[in-house]
Amino acid sequence: MPPERRRRMKLDRRTGAKPKRKPGMRPDWKAGAGPGGPPQKPAPSSQRKPPARPSAAAAAIAVAAAEEERRLRQRNRLRLEEDKPAVERCLEELVFGDVENDEDALLRRRGPRLSPPLEVQEHEDSGDSEVENEAKGNFPPQKKPVWVDEEDEDEEMVDMMNNRFRKDMMKNASESKLSKDNLKKRLKEEFQHAMGGVPAWAETTKRKTSSDDESEEDEDDLLQRTGNFISTSTSLPRGILKMKNCQHANAERPTVARISSVQFHPGAQIVMVAGLDNAVSLFQVDGKTNPKIQSIYLERFPIFKACFSANGEEVLATSTHSKVLYVYDMLAGKLIPVHQVRGLKEKIVRSFEVSPDGSFLLINGIAGYLHLLAMKTKELIGSMKINGRVAASTFSSDSKKVYASSGDGEVYVWDVNSRKCLNRFVDEGSLYGLSIATSRNGQYVACGSNCGVVNIYNQDSCLQETNPKPIKAIMNLVTGVTSLTFNPTTEILAIASEKMKEAVRLVHLPSCTVFSNFPVIKNKNISHVHTMDFSPRSGYFALGNEKGKALMYR
């Protein structure tokens, strides 16, 4: 600095006057320029606006907004604390200290999901209630899958060439395999081509939605379902039975000898016919010609009864005047005679029964004896004795009990395993019994007597009561009932008497009423019935008479 200027500055300081500056020279900060920036001209006085003072309404809005923000933060903080388990809260106290009063830090750790900007929250709260807003915040975040299987993304290909139904849908040889989506489209195209377009019932977009026509909406829903609208009853109606005559079962091997046994094979469309002509014949059942399969001739052996085994692999036959039991093995084609059973002291073996499970063979002896044999070995297991003579016997459906009808009109119930008598009762109105049968479902027991009455009992009452009452007494026959047979579905009971022509009736169960259209009295071709049987599915009904004819109905 020059000495003159330094001297002048000292003098001004002593007198208290400010140093004079040249006109037009102003410091840079007066001109409004920043440090190191170019000088700027000040705005004219006419363009300057005085600073706006905050009004009372704006201050109230700001206070309300601050209060609302505080309330929302408080609510989010409480919600965060409620959602956290006790273990997590304890861990946060150990890491971050005691209960946190800094709401901003708490919300920062929670994330931006529960603390949106204030203006967004105010906008949402303006239209929704507080409960709805809380529900919106409770949705969990959408998580990304940790692992993705690449094989799931590969389209599964469907073989079109080796399927005879899909082979017709191929348009060219390159479509030997199609994806599931393409196959779906192809099936849809085939259906629309066959129907001539999309049927009306398949168009869901044209459904009526008017609230005043609910019945039409129900009809639309109904028409979009497949299947029968009205289902038929599974039970057999009573009154009239629809049936027709078929070709005789033994039409290809006619005979004049009495038919003693007719039985359908348990597992094949085969019917067996045996009679007093010493022959057992097998026929294929078709209802038209019934071709013969095989005939087994037993010399000097008029057959009293022939029966299939439970598995259908054997045929057992007894004679009217012999103690020999013939067993014909159908698989091997061998005829095996059983001349003597050890421990069996019967001179004549005639009537017998096979258990439904194929384990036992029951032989009706003389003097009231019932002999139980093993079906596989034909060895004697044990014997049971009743008072009087044995008129008829049968197994229960579970093969655990034996029902025996005596000549005194009594019915005995035996246990197969222990061979002890479980119950004994008198058949109501019977002088002496002739026949007895049990239903396949284990519900009924039918007893036929000499006076032509058939009493139908409940099996439970036969086991528990000493004097059971029959459910129904069938009195449509006037002579002794010699044959009783239930059909496999326990809907029909066939009753017959060999003492009188056309003496056969079909009883409907559970109504216990007789079908009025069988037999047809005008034809009179049934004659004396000696044996009856139903096919395994109750499609056919066969009976044998004394004229050598095995009549068959469908």
Image: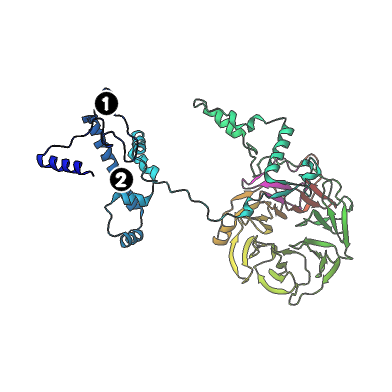
Answer with left or right where residue 503 lies relative to residue 405. Answer: right
Tell me: 98 left or right of 228: left
Q: How many marks?
A: 2
User: Camera-side residue: 41 or 384?
Assistant: 41
Identify residue type, mark 2: Arg
Q: CA distance from mark 2 to mark 1?
A: 41 Å
Q: Measured from the top left, where is residue 381 in percent x and y?
A: 69, 74
Callout 1: few (<14), some (14-19), or many (20+) C-alpha neighbours within 10 Å? few
Q: Is residue 547 left or right of residue 392?
A: right
Label 1 element class = loop
Q: Earlier along the polypeptide chain: callout 2 or callout 1?
A: 1
Q: Nearer the viewer, residue 510 or 329?
A: 329
Q: Nearer the viewer, mark 2 or mark 1?
A: 1
Magenta-span inclusion, residue 509: yes
Badge number at residue 260: none
Disc sitting over residue 48 in the figure: 1
Dot 2 and dot 1 residues touching (CB under 8 Å): no
Residue shown at the point (72%, 67%) measured from the top left: 361
The quadrant in which residue 367 appears is: bottom right
Estimate the x, y position of residue 221 in percent, counting from the top left. 58, 34
User: From what the image shows, is residue 279 above or below residue 28?
Assistant: below
306, above or below 550, in the image: below
Tag 1: amino acid: Arg
Residue where numbered disc 2 is placed: 73
Q: Which residues are magenta?
A: 492-519
**Judging from the image, what secondary structure is the residue with disc 2 in?**
helix
Residue 244: image x %, image y %? 78, 42
The C terminus, quarter of image? top right
Query: Measured along the vertical axis of the image, is residue 9 above or below residue 433?
Result: above
